[in-house]
Amino acid sequence: MSQHGVNSEINRLLGFLLLSVAIGLLLGQVLLTIIAGALLYIAYQLANMRRLLKWLKHHRLQEVPDANGLWGEIFDLLSRRKRLEIREKKRFKATIARITATTSALSDAVILLNSSYGLSWWNEATEELLDLKPRDIGSSIINFVRHPDFVNYLESGKYDIPLTLASPRNIEISLEFQFTPVGDGEALLVIRDITRIYKLEKMRKDFVANVTHELRTPLTVIRGYLEVLEDKLPEQSQDEHYPKALEQMRQQSLRMTTLINDLTMLSKLETDSVNKTQEYVQLKPLLEMICDEARAISTQGHEIILTCDKNLYLLANDRELHSAFSNLVTNAVKYSPDGKVIEVMASINLANNLLVEVKDSGIGIDQQHISRLTERFYRVDSSRSIQTGGTGLGLAIVKHILLRHDSRLQIRSIHGEGSTFTCVFPERRVKESDNISETSTNVNSKAV
Ligand code: ADP
């Protein structure tokens, strides 16, 4: 409101007063005419207020009431504000329409949930995927996806890894659920149909599992005949090539057996449910056994030192743990020259995680390879790996096993100086006790 408008209103009031006084003087009734003038002024203000109210009620923007002075300014200002508001509203509506059109084009279901998992909004694809009707607004999403894993997922508070489940409407369809909190207790749930990817992945896993299974029998037969031939060789052959060829055949068949064993292990890790029985495994005897096995395969007399408190227990599958730690210690032996020291240490760090470290002072690994080491068949130096009986699958197996235990593998290495492989287990899986018997009940672990 400008000063000009206020001044003109004051002038109007003064004008009324002066006129009333002048008329009062003429009539000899000053007080009466001042009262009459004041009443007239009030009536004028009330009339303008009434016009304002009427105008605001009827929203007829084009018909701005005609007034001057302060009232003229008030009407102008309000009409400008109203116009702006209408323009903003239009823009807002257009944006909403655009977002709705875009989300309708999405093949993924997008759902906005309130703080109690009630449905606030969803796109077209959701209607198809979950059979939602407009009347379902406000109902809990749990009424539409009743699977206990889904409820656990919602309540876990851990949403970095999406959940895969069969569709509640058709078990042939695989759905991936990704829940993302979006502040103020609301959340966005995106559901993707991953049936094709899931089927392809399953085909791949089944193929590997079948091939390895089918190869096992012929390989056993070949190895059996090779042993027979080796036994018979001295009587039959004078040719020096035969023993060499037979030895190579034996070595290669041994490699194939190791490869098949590793592939079978990997495919079991991929297909077996994580919810296998897990119990508290005492680490010290397990690591002692692994170190003894490593000493037995170390032809070059490595010194293997174990540091582990006997009170440390880990909630895990002991066979899988054995396989993971054994792969790391065997690698340390394979990739360290004669007589080097290998340290195996179990400890609790400041964040209360359990660390199982395998440290060697062997050939080390160049930085550029470290991020790829856990890929299947990735080898830094394939000739060395093959020469030492490696399959290139050991670290992939370790990574899979750790994932099944909500854990991860850290690799630090300096080329030419040595490497440290650390398995990091979360606090909730660790117990420090001198008597675990009362806690060694079976507990299911969560998929990662
Ligand atoms: P492999 O059967 O070839 O040993 P792994 O998956 O166990 O396969 O290891 C992958 C590669 O990582 C190996 O080929 C090797 O180059 C490297 N590697 C693993 N452990 C060590 C180690 N302790 N020191 C140096 N290199 C290692």
Image (cartoon, rainbow, N blue to C red):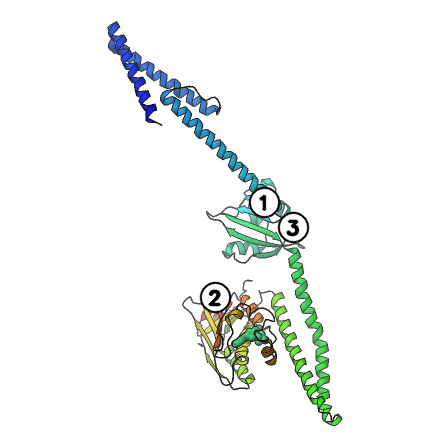
Distance CA(mark 3)–CA(mark 2): 36 Å
Q: From the viewer's side, name the closer residue of 113 and 97.
A: 97
Q: Is residue 274 left or right of residue 77?
A: right
Where's ligand 1: which quadrant? bottom right
Under mark 2, the amino acid is: Pro
Q: From the viewer's side, name the closer residue of 192 and 384.
A: 384
Q: Secondary structure at mark 1?
A: helix
- Sequence-wise, the earlier of marks 3 and 1 is 1
- In the picture of the structure, the residue carrying the numbered disc 3 is 169
Q: Dividing the picture into quarters, in which one does residue 237 lie?
A: bottom right
Distance CA(mark 1)–CA(mark 2): 39 Å
Point out the residue furthest to the right here. Answer: 236
Image quadrant in which the N terminus is located: top left
Residue 102, given in percent of the width and then of the height, sits at 58, 44
Q: Nearer the viewer, mark 3 or mark 2?
A: 2
Query: Are circles 3 and 1 on residues that touch, CB within 8 Å?
Result: no
Packing grade of label 1 (10 A; few <14, some 14-19, many >=20) is some
Query: Are circles 1 and 2 on residues that touch, CB within 8 Å?
Result: no
Residue 65, given in percent of the width and then of the height, sits at 44, 20
Distance CA(mark 3)–CA(mark 1): 22 Å
Under mark 1, the amino acid is: Thr
Q: Is residue 74 left or right of residue 227?
A: left
Point out the residue furthest to the top here. Answer: 27
Under mark 3, the amino acid is: Arg
- In the picture of the structure, the residue carrying the numbered disc 1 is 103
Q: Residue at x 42, y 22 (%)?
A: 52
- Sequence-wise, the earlier of marks 3 and 2 is 3
Q: Which mark is residue 426?
A: 2
Q: From the viewer's side, name the closer residue of 245 and 396.
A: 245
